[in-house]
Image: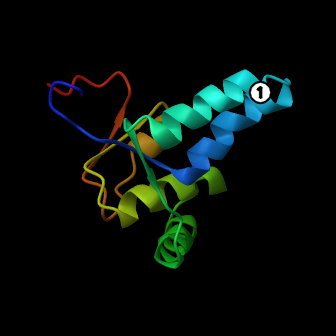
Amino acid sequence: MQRRADVLCTSVFTLGEVLTGPRKYGRPADVDRARQFFMNSGRVELLPFTAQTADRYSSIRSDTRVEPADAIHLASASEFGVELFLTHDKKLQKLSIPGIHFIAGLDAKLL
């Protein structure tokens, strides 16, 4: 990814998910480290959840049986035209979502 100068994108919802664990277990230093990585490292682009993203979310939820959290991630990726959506979820890997070129597993051989 770094050799190709790819941009790692994720929904702002991911930040909330990542911060929950350390916050739940009273680990403020880990909360700060995660926040720094996602917000200030320059290595991640946080995709906003806009009114247009909400519209895509509703389409994804009505057309598929994905969980709400997954639909948020897919809608964000779709709205911003993400080339590759990586996931461990085999069910998501089978989907075709307009605006996302490829959905693959983290173990996919991409090169």
Q: Considering only vertical position in the picture, is 60 above or below 68?
A: below
Q: Which is more toward the observer, 13 or 73?
A: 13
Circle 1 Cα neighbour tier, 10 Å, few/some/many (<14 / 14–19 / ≥20): few
In the image, is residue 89 above or below residue 53?
A: above
| Residue at numbered disc 1 | 28
Camera-nearest residue between 57 and 80: 80
Asked if residue 87 shows in the view, the reply is yes
Residue at the location (29% across, 25% down)? 108
Name the residue rendered at 58%, 44% in the picture. Answer: 14
Answer left or right for 45 relative to 110: right
Q: Is residue 91 visible?
A: no
In the image, residue 50 lies at what x, y percent?
52, 72
Question: For residue 18, what is the image quadrant?
Answer: top right
Left or right, 74 with respect to 24, comes to: left
Image quarter where the C terminus lies is top left
Q: Amino acid at mark 1?
A: Pro
Q: Residue sitting at 30 percent across and 63 percent down?
A: 99
The image quarter in which residue 8 lies = top left
